[in-house]
Amino acid sequence: MSDIATDSGIENIDTSTPIGSYRRAWVGYSLDEEIRKRAASGGIVTATLCYLLETEQVEGALVCSSDFANGEFNFRLSIARTREELFEAQSSKYFDIPVLKGLDLVKAFEGKVAVVGLPSQINSLTRRMSKNKLLREKIGFRIALFCGHNSKKELIERVWEKKGIDPKKIDRFRYRQGHWRGQMELTMKDGSVQRFPFQDFSHYQNLHILSLDRCLNCHDHMGYYSDLSTGDVWLHEMKRDLVKYSVFLARTPLAEKVMMEMSERNLIKAKQVDRRFVYRSQKRSINYHYNLSARAKVGKWLRLNIKDRTGERPKLRDVVAAIIVLTNHRISRSPRLLNLFMKLPKPFVATYLYLFKGLVNYERKRY
């Protein structure tokens, strides 16, 4: 149990299970087609931010947009105040973005701000809020995106290199949109559009190639310290539906109220689901991510300092999965080995990934 943010709206958060404590959970999507067509998943994040702005529960939202200033791929943090500005920042970003560097923008902004971030970032933000009255007054809503780990910017740049794409010729870029696994979309400066399967990137990303060092020590997949946490629904029975779904959890009374209002106003489709559905929707990622004990055990063998915060009793398959991840982490640190790995045929990389997924595809007793 943890109560690091009792002054900011969260009390007695249970972090002893992967999902943690929450009030209600739903599966659904935005009923606004304009929001959904740009979304990586069901558009719940953008729909919620639009609603908070339009009902004046916040005056702005701290968001991140892809940026290609001077021909170099990077990011830009800003406070979105309109629906159009939210659309500019829509869709997932799969590289390291220091969201909390935007807190100076939040402090200088006139009015309350919603913040979207990864679980570790929302965790850090909430700790700061518990010690800082100004932040408690300024932050009106926190949304956490489910996260297995994050990647270095170099990964997407290497994928573009494999595809023969010159970053200097890119005008706009979206990591993922469309149904199920989705596609990457690049709008070039000459007006042409290039698309390719998201899996051409995600195979490497899911194998933790060029993942961030700090992610090895994280077990919060679900965003314990958020108001609302949300992510994809990776269930084959949902694949046949023409609309892509999100699963979303209200962890605070505020989030529960907001989601109920949005459902009543027909802004979102929201079907209440139980804890098991939430677990199943992200099962493989949860099984690996929460089992910090396996990584800590293997880390000792490889002389990596990984602190066990969960006290799990890892299965043999958890240990083997941890060996794969930490081996790939070592490969990523060696330019020579990384170059060789990126040249491997796609079927080999896919088989390696399926092996990893098979290892973490089992039923936990507590979730």
Image (cartoon, helix red, strand yellow):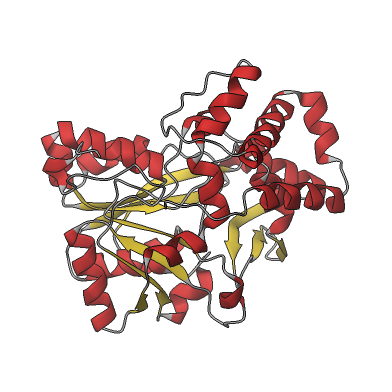
The image shows residue 284, relative to residue 234, as above or below, that is above
Q: Residue at x 68, y 32 (%)?
A: 323
Q: Quadrant of residue 95?
A: top right
- Left or right: residue 52 versus residue 91 is left
Percent x, y of residue 227: 26, 54
Q: Residue at x 71, y 66 (%)?
A: 192
Residue 240 visible? The answer is: yes
- Residues 256 and 104: in front is 256
Q: Quadrant of the N terminus?
A: top left
Percent x, y of residue 332: 70, 30
The image shows residue 103, relative to residue 356, as above or below, that is above
- Left or right: residue 172 versus residue 364 is right
- Left or right: residue 280 versus residue 133 is right
Q: Residue at x 29, y 38 (%)?
A: 125
Residue 168 visible? The answer is: no
Q: Residue at x 21, y 40 (%)?
A: 108
- Residues 283 and 94: in front is 283
Q: Residue furthest top?
A: 303
- Residues 94 and 86: in front is 94
Tally the marks. Answer: 0
Percent x, y of residue 82: 31, 65
- Left or right: residue 310 versus residue 168 is left
Percent x, y of residue 244: 53, 74
